[in-house]
Image (tube, rainbow, N blue to C red):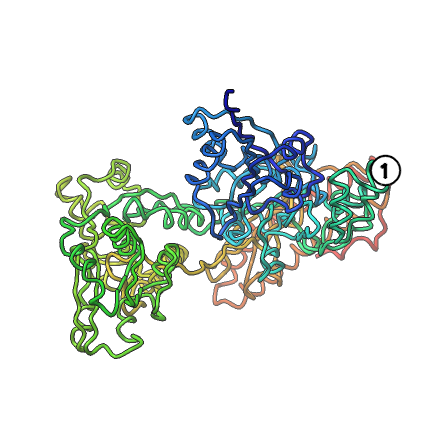
């Protein structure tokens, strides 16, 4: 008798609740002999399989232990080849960020039969459960679904231009999502909603704006969740009220719901599902049925959807050359681009293995002889533990050696390997490691895997001077590339670069080394270029090899360097020199990756108004002021130009220049005409008063009366001409509508 052939079903379980499982999926689960399921799959679905079914939980929950994908593939093939009916149950739909392709590849290679059973994706169901339509004829013509597991891999420039965004796996990266969206121009008043455990009894919903959502969710675990960003979020309360159920969570009635899933409901085919719900943590639906009515968060803002113009970003007109290693430049490039800069990468470092593994291999073989392992960079972590695994087959060691690291980023890289550092100094520089070491250094045996050449010697010298025995071994090398990147060379030759950045002394050395063979006068290309350094040690190299340094970070991180460039770019020319001269202290090891810290946010002006253009002018002190005129600007119509003081703007002396024009109105009532006429005469009165103030100020100067008269006439004539045009327009409207305003409506003539 022929042996029965096995088969694997890749099944989507939907968003969670068994009520959203497809009929086909339910039938297949009832026949399962082996169930391989993810941790996020609802426990009720596990109960749908026969009692004799072998159940294998493979994890796949972010940040928690999971079975390696290769092992999952092996399990599917193994049980299928044993003739079993295998169900691979995945949350949502198996083909939306579900790694089904890898499993299918393994099954095809093993010649195993398989079938795909679609499921409802949480990307579609979660917004609906929150009362949020992903599209709307007026608010959104499209939606985009992305995974937020790795924000660095996303094209934020493109994403910010799209209508509705749906982020999956974004619970842990919400702050980064908000930062990237705002940094690339999305308005801080853009609505956002977070739906956790969509469609389950513990469903929760938070909504707000990009400005408020982080405060609303601070300290709250959000995973697993779906994040929706866009104007359609404003429809949540409206649709929730109409449906009555979309903003509510399941009640705690597992037994009744379990019977219903199995077809044993006691109240007919559908049961009383409405009775089995409870309110979520979200606010109740608004009493207003108007879809576009403002939410509590947006009502305080005059403009819920006014993106930051790229031209308002502090580095919008700057081209910046980044000289980090190609493998390390992404983060810095993103930081600069988020502030509006055009970034050109010119890698001056190539990170690779040392010229010989001999010394490191010997040190690893004698690892038990050391008291401490010192790691000062992520490169050191990567190459040391990679070599350790190649030699011993393990990425850990059984010895009691302690580990000290320099920098939070280095510590995080170690934690990703499952290893907890024993000591991280309070400041992320090597000198702080010596000054704050947790035990006396005398007699300690220290292993220090480091860059093969070019690193600072301060750590080794200080440890040795205090009695420690330090063994330095080469774990990696940072070399100069063979040639300069062509786009960088063209930009330098054509004088298109505004700033060149250096994050280590080696980048300065290699920058010069790459340019010297190209041209004898390459330094003239840098005449008007700002030289930016991450810290004093790097600045010393800039001074020695380039003759100057214009920008130096106060905090020795990529964020600190970005902030220093912004400060330099926004300063007056005289202030830029002071910025470069006012910095201090110690820079990181030349091979260390700088750490991270928050950047100052670029926020939207508080007086931004939808549909009005932003006017940018300078006040009397030379500071830039942004202003939205209260009157609508109409092209090709007469204009009155005047200086309008505004006590609400920054600085007591702020004087704003704006153009105000009045188009011929279509009047529907006499009240409408009165309002328009009153507004125009108010503007005229303001203009009159400003001219009077200016004349008084000029009269106090030592200028002669003739000079004052010469200055007065053009101003007066210009104003009177514009005023006459406005009055003529008003009169034409009055005659057309046979309406005469009362004298009380008119201000006294100036």
Identified at 17% across, 48% down, the residue is 512
Density class for disc 1 (Cα within 10 Å; few <14, some 14-19, many ≥20) is few
* Residue at mark 1: 268
Name the side, left or right, on which 309 lies relative to 264. left
Along the line of sight, which residue is nearer the eye, 436 or 536? 436
Quadrant assignment, res 54: top right
Along the line of sight, which residue is nearer the eye, 355 or 718? 355
Identified at 84% across, 38% down, the residue is 668
Identified at 19% across, 51% down, the residue is 477
Q: Is mark 1 on a helix, strand or loop?
A: loop
* Residue 673 appears in the rendering: no
The vertical placement of 4 against 257, above or below, is: above
How far across and how far down the image is residue 501, in percent? Answer: 29, 52
How far across and how far down the image is residue 88, in percent? Answer: 55, 36
Identified at 20% across, 73% down, the residue is 463
How far across and how far down the image is residue 322, in percent? Answer: 31, 47
Name the side, left or right, on which 153 lies relative to 654. left
Name the side, left or right, on which 397 lies relative to 81. left
Along the line of sight, which residue is nearer the eye, 495 or 654? 495
The residue most toward the top is 1
The vertical placement of 614 against 158, above or below, is: below
Locate the C terminus and report the quarter of the image it occupies: bottom right
The residue most toward the front is 1
* Residue 172 appears in the rendering: yes
How far across and how far down the image is residue 257, in percent? Answer: 75, 46
Q: How many numbered callouts?
A: 1
């Amino acid at each position: 008798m022929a042996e029965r052939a096995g088969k694997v079903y890749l099944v989507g379980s939907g968003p969670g609740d068994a009520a959203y499982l497809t009929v086909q999926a339910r039938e297949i689960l009832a026949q399962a002999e082996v169930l391989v399921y993810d941790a996020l799959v609802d426990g009720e679905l596990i109960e749908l399989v026969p009692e004799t079914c072998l159940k294998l939980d493979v994890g796949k929950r972010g940040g928690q232990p999971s079975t390696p994908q290769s092992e999952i593939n092996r399990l599917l093939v193994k049980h299928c080849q044993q003739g079993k009916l295998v169900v691979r149950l995945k949350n949502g739909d198996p083909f939306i960020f579900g790694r089904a392709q890898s499993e299918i590849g393994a099954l095809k290679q093993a010649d195993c039969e398989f079938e795909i059973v679609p499921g409802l994706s949480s990307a579609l169901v979660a917004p609906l459960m929150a009362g949020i339509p992903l599209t709307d004829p007026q608010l959104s013509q499209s939606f985009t679904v992305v995974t937020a597991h790795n924000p660095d891999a996303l094209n934020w420039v493109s994403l910010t231009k799209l209508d509705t965004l749906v982020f999956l796996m974004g619970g842990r990266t919400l702050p980064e999502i908000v930062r990237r969206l705002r940094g690339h121009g999305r308005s801080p008043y853009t609505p956002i909603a977070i739906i956790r455990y969509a469609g389950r009894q513990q469903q929760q919903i938070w909504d707000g704006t990009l400005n408020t959502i982080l405060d609303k969710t601070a300290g709250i675990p959000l995973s697993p969740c779906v994040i929706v960003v866009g104007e359609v979020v404003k429809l949540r309360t409206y649709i929730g009220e109409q449906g009555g159920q979309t903003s509510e969570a399941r009640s705690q009635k597992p037994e009744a719901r379990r019977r219903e899933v199995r077809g044993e409901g006691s109240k007919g085919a559908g049961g009383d599902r409405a009775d089995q719900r409870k309110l979520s943590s979200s606010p109740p639906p608004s009493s207003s049925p108007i879809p576009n009515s403002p939410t509590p968060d947006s009502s305080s803002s005059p403009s819920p959807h006014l993106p930051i113009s790229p031209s308002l970003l502090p580095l919008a007109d700057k081209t910046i050359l980044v000289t980090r290693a190609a493998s390390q430049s992404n983060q810095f490039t993103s930081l600069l681009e988020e502030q509006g800069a055009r970034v050109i990468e010119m890698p001056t470092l190539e990170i690779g293995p040392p010229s010989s593994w001999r010394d490191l291999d010997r040190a690893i073989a004698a690892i038990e002889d050391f008291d401490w392992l010192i790691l000062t960079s992520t490169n050191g972590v990567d190459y040391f533990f990679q070599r350790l695994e190649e030699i011993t087959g393990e990425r850990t060691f059984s010895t009691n050696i302690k580990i000290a690291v320099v920098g939070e980023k280095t510590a995080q890289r170690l934690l990703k390997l499952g290893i907890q550092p024993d000591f991280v100094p309070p400041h992320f520089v090597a000198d702080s490691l010596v000054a704050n070491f947790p035990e006396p250094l005398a007699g300690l045996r220290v292993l220090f895997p480091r860059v093969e050449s070019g690193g600072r010697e301060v750590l080794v010298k200080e440890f040795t001077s205090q009695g420690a025995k330090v063994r330095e071994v080469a774990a990696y090398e940072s070399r100069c590339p063979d040639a300069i990147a062509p786009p960088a060379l063209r930009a330098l030759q054509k004088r298109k670069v505004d700033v060149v950045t250096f994050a280590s002394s080696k980048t300065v050395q290699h920058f010069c080394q790459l340019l010297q063979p190209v041209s004898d006068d390459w330094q003239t290309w840098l005449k008007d270029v700002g030289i930016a350094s991450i810290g004093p040690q790097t600045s010393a190299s800039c001074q020695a090899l380039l003759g100057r340094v214009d920008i130096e970070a106060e905090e020795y991180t990529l964020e600190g360097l970005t902030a220093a460039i912004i400060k330099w770019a926004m300063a007056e020319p005289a202030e830029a020199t002071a910025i470069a001269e006012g910095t201090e202290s110690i820079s990181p090891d030349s091979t260390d990756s700088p750490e991270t810290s928050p950047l100052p946010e670029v926020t939207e002006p508080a007086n931004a108004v939808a549909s009005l253009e932003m006017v940018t002018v300078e006040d009397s002190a030379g500071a830039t002021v942004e202003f939205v005129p209260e009157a609508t600007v109409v092209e090709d119509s007469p204009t009155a130009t005047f200086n309008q003081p505004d006590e609400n703007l920054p600085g007591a002396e702020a004087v704003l220049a704006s153009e105000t024009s009045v188009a011929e109105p279509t009047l529907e009532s006499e009240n409408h005409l009165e309002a328009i006429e009153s507004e125009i005469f108010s503007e005229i009165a303001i203009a009159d008063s400003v001219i009077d103030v200016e004349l008084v100020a000029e009269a106090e100067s030592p200028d002669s009366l003739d000079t004052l008269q010469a200055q007065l006439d053009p101003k007066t004539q210009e104003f009177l001409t514009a005023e006459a045009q406005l009055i003529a327009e008003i009169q034409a409207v009055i005659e057309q509508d046979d309406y005469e305003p009362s004298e009380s409506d008119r201000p006294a003539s100036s």
